[in-house]
Image (cartoon, rainbow, N blue to C red):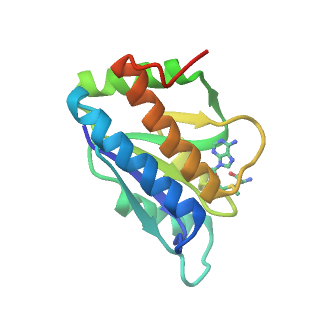
Amino acid sequence: MKVTICAVGRLRKSPELELISDYLERFRKAGRAFGLGPASVIEVEDKKNLGMEAEAALLDRAIPAGSVLVTLDERGDVVSSPEFAERLAGWRDQARDVSFVIGGADGIAPSLRARADWSLSFGRMVWPHMLVRVMLAEQLYRAGQIVAGTPYHRV
Ligand SMILES: C[S@@+](CC[C@H](N)C(=O)[O-])C[C@H]1O[C@@H](n2cnc3c(N)ncnc32)[C@H](O)[C@@H]1O
């Protein structure tokens, strides 16, 4: 089951990039035995600053065809980590690939939000998009650990 994180903006060498690479590598290694992952990141850049709809068109091209489309949005559903793990395992069982979309400074265009299969929130506060990438990478790794039954996730 392939996971693709489609995100607006290019993340340069930074502590956030190191964390994302580390969590996604851990997710790849641990998820393999359980059919979860690997996860990769596709970045899109609206170089001419044409706005949300232009970003949505770029994101649209980056989203792998046929994958479950999940938008990251503060107005979306707030779920627990075990619930997130259950969703991920459910898509794996249906042999579906999954794409997570993270917007830019203005958020995700309504047209793209409208066609999402699910909208996931990390709480009602707005986070910087690069931190959302880190949080998503960690939750993917955590979900893998929950599915594997390791003690990484403690309630
Ligand atoms: C700086 S935020 C943009 C916020 C903007 N107000 C909006 O309408 O979405 C950049 C991106 O980070 C993600 N994001 C920010 N806060 C989030 C949250 N609490 N839950 C899930 N995703 C979030 C979303 O994908 C958002 O498009």
Residue at 44% over, 37% down: 140
Residue 89 x/y as whole percent: 34, 23
| Residue at far bottom of view | 48
Q: Count of labels shown?
A: 0
25 sits left or right of 55 in the view: left
Tell me if I can see residue 50 in this picture: yes
Q: Is residue 97 above or below residue 12?
A: above
Quarter in which the C terminus is drawn = top right
Residue at 55% over, 36% down: 119
Tell me if I can see residue 117 in this picture: no
Residue 20 x/y as whole percent: 49, 54
| Residue at far front of view | 151
Residue 126 x/y as whole percent: 75, 48
148 sits left or right of 135 in the view: left
Residue at 57% over, 18% down: 154
Q: Is residue 72 above or below residue 5?
A: above
Residue 122 x/y as whole percent: 65, 37
Rendered image quadrant of residue 15: bottom right
Q: In this orientation, which residue lies closer to the viewer: 22 or 129? A: 22
82 sits left or right of 91 in the view: right
Quarter in which the N terminus is drawn = top left
